[in-house]
Amino acid sequence: MDTIVSLAKRRGFVFAGSEIYGGLANTWDYGPLGVELKRNIERLWWKRFVHDRADMVGIDAAILMHPKVWEASGHVAGFNDALVDCKSCKTRHRADHLIEAQTSERVEGKSAPELTALLSAHNVKCPICGKSDFTEVRKFNLLFRTHIGPVEDQSSAVYLRGETAQAMFVNFKNILNSTRQKIPFGIAQIGKSFRNEITPGNFIFRTLEFTQAEIEYFIKPTEWEKSFDEWQRGMEEWLIGLGVEDEHFRIREHSKEELSHYSKRTIDIEYNFPFGWKELYGLAYRTDFDLANHQRVSGQDLTYFDSETNERYLPHVIEPTFGIDRTFLILLLDAYHEEEAPTAEEGETETRVVLRLHKELAPIKVAILPLSKKPELSKVARSIFDELKQHFVCEYDETQSIGKRYRRQDEIGTPYCVTVDFDSLNDNAVTVRERDSMKQERI
Ligand code: GAP
């Protein structure tokens, strides 16, 4: 992880947030290369799951939603984590994480008193000071609260959305009325969500604000198992398509106790991170939980009328959910390679770092590298840049030795380098170097 975090900073993928003020813990800013990679992930996701499917439409909803949305969804009452403080060293922890890390028990869904009892029964130790002296476990709501208007009272309180999903439920009728979609169909969204996490960390793995790409797929209740299986395959194929090694991820079924308040069945797609197997994505069968609750609380009819069978019913929902920041992280981890490569000196090698990113994901597709800064070479190289930039994201770089410039492009995952040399002035040809094989071809 340290290697990836330092590469991310050095090359401008990800910076610590508000760094010149000492940073704001667990906030991160995507830099010039990071924003390209992140947008490429989002663009590919949107193409695959929205544009390439006739049964999918997208939305881009407001982050601030009516507070009743979060009451109806169950988040105000049930979106809690279990917090515990070490009395000895005054550090704060998630009780469930402490117990799961030090025992073989899975404890999601357990009440605060049950967790307090487990901490003491297993003699769980503080990972910072090693003592077993904790406060009682308390439940803590993850929704970020803010206020609309100048007066901060209860009536002006709103929440930043804790998941993008709710906007798809509250817009269900709008989509039915404004599009030609019929069940089964899905609504997709990519956007920021916010959670006041007790223990964020591991770089961009768990942060306070993060980007989710979510789909709410509306189905006939009897179709849920078939749809669930199709979406599981769809999620796995997405990862394979991005070039992620299949032995690096696995499926984990949630136990009954662990299921979220809205779910009848959930699986996590876990990735083998340097800090262990952890959730990358989720797939949940949310039944009609959300539509039924929004119908009840809003008083609006959210049923669907099937004109072929003359049936009226509340659709059920399969929800594939993807964390974009976690996708970003695993793509860096999966793509990172160190290998021996020949230097300019005959018979000598050096270690090169190469990001073997899928070409569609690479932030820069082509680097144009004149051999020297001589004006006659720059002129030709600039004209190649101007032509290629119409089709690809390109970078123009004429400083440092050509070897160093190749290494820099390898390290940021650029698939092709185009070198312009003095022969180019006569033969109208350039050298194209491919990142992974390092093969050079004169064309
Ligand atoms: N709508 C369902 C939902 O939000 P979730 O498992 O709580 O389910 C979905 O979140 C995905 O969002 C996760 O699989 C993960 O990729 C991402 N995610 C959740 N919390 C996150 C956090 N604090 N930081 C970064 N990504 C997060």
Image: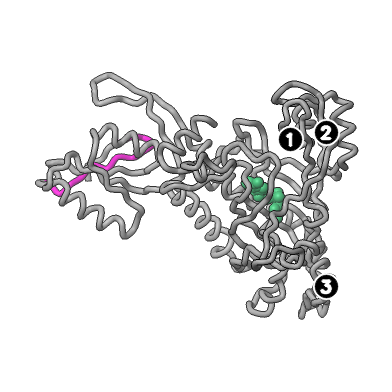
Q: Residues within 10 Å of mark 3 (few under 14, many from 20)?
A: few
Residue 247: image location, x then y, percent: 61, 35
Q: Quadrant of the N terminus?
A: top right
Residue 129: image location, x then y, percent: 72, 22
Mark 3, secondary structure of its residue = strand
Quadrant in which residue 198 is drawn: top right
Q: Main secondary structure of the magenta part?
A: loop
| Residue at numbered disc 3 | 313
Q: Which residue is pictured at 65% across the width and 40% down the height?
A: 200
Res. 135 mark: 2
- Please name the amino acid that badge 3 sits on: Tyr
CA distance for labels 3 and 2: 48 Å
Foreground mark, 3 or 2?
A: 2
In magenta stretch: residue 253: no
Horizontal placement of 322 versus 407: left or right?
right
| Residue at numbered disc 1 | 93
Residue 59: image location, x then y, percent: 60, 67
Mark 2, secondary structure of its residue = loop
**Magenta-drawn segment:** 427-439
Mark 2 and mark 1 in contact? Answer it, CB < 8 Å. Answer: no
Label 2 beta carbon less than 8 Å to ligand 1: no
CA distance for labels 1 and 3: 44 Å
Q: Which residue is pictured at 48% across the width and 37% down the height?
A: 335
Mark 3 and mark 2 in contact? Answer it, CB < 8 Å. Answer: no
Quadrant in which residue 199 is drawn: top right
Q: Residues within 10 Å of mark 2 (few under 14, many from 20)?
A: some
- Please name the amino acid that badge 2 sits on: Thr
The numbered mark, 1 or 3, whose residue comes first in the sequence reads 1
